[in-house]
């Protein structure tokens, strides 16, 4: 098991709790009167999705999709692959795609194109973190964003480095 050095806390448990509540408030207002399908992007979004969903008051259903990501390094390969597809048909549904972090945007731009082709009534993105990456490749329709962060590698609250640290309740920066 490779241990990286945790440099500093970026967002505390309380800051995350507060911001997730604000996002849920916006979503509750925007989707009032509609049924919502939350699609969690595995694995990183699982904790954010669970906390967000518990603050939603609109009727929600869940599905999950898994994509290839960084593997064991902290750099993107640029190749996106679906490892686990959705269980349900999303045509005619109001879909909110829930992501942990947007870096280059390659994963989401691929997923948005792929899911748009399945004919949802609406498709929007909710990401906890939006990284100001110099390598941002795509202009994405991000409707809900928790925090914007500089181009650092962060872990915790679902985010990993080589599958470690996902269970940290706060978000921290590590040395690459
Ligand atoms: P993108 O396709 O470059 O936008 O990368 C998105 C995916 O890369 C996320 O879903 C994460 O799995 C992973 N990722 C990007 N930046 C970080 C980070 O700082 N920490 C942990 N995972 C990250």
Image: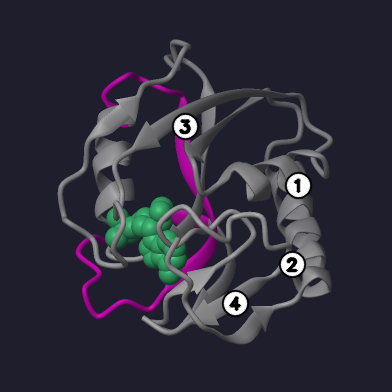
Mark 1 vs mark 2: which is more N-terminal? 2
The residue mark sitting in front, 4 or 3, is 4
Residue linked to disc 4: 172
In the image, taking residue 32 as reference, residue 104 lies left or right, namely left
Pick the residue in front: 91 or 101: 101
Q: CA distance from mark 3 to mark 2?
A: 27 Å
Mark 4 vs mark 2: which is more N-terminal? 2
In the image, taking residue 107 as reference, residue 132 lies left or right, namely right
Q: CA distance from mark 4 to mark 2?
A: 12 Å
Q: Can residue 141 be seen at all in this image of the molecule? A: no
Residue linked to disc 3: 122
Q: Secondary structure at mark 2?
A: helix
Where residue 69 appears, as percent x and y from the top left, is: 31, 49
Image quarter of residue 152:
bottom left
Mark 4 vs mark 3: which is more N-terminal? 3
Residue linked to disc 2: 16
Q: Secondary structure at mark 3?
A: strand
Pick the residue in front: 66 or 26: 66
Pick the residue in front: 151 or 93: 151
Mark 1 vs mark 4: which is more N-terminal? 1
Name which residue lies at 79% across and 69% down.
13
How many circles with numbers are drawn on the protein? Answer: 4
């Amino acid at each position: 098991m490779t241990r990286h050095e945790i440099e500093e806390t970026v967002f505390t448990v309380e800051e995350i709790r507060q911001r997730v509540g604000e996002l849920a408030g916006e979503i509750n207002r925007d989707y009032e009167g509609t049924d919502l399908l939350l699609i969690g992007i595995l694995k990183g979004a699982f904790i954010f999705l669970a906390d967000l969903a518990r603050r939603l008051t609109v009727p929600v259903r869940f599905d999950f999709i898994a994509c290839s990501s960084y593997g064991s390094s902290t750099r993107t390969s640029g190749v996106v692959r679906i490892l686990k597809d959705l269980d349900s048909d999303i045509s005619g549904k109001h879909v909110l795609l829930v992501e942990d972090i947007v870096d280059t945007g390659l994963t989401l731009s691929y997923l948005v194109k792929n899911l748009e082709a399945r004919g949802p009534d609406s498709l929007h993105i909710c990401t906890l973190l939006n990284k100001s990456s110099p390598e941002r490749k795509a202009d994405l329709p991000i409707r809900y964003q928790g925090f914007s962060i500089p181009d650092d590698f962060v872990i915790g609250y679902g985010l990993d480095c080589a599958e470690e640290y996902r269970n940290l309740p706060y978000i921290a920066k590590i040395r690459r």
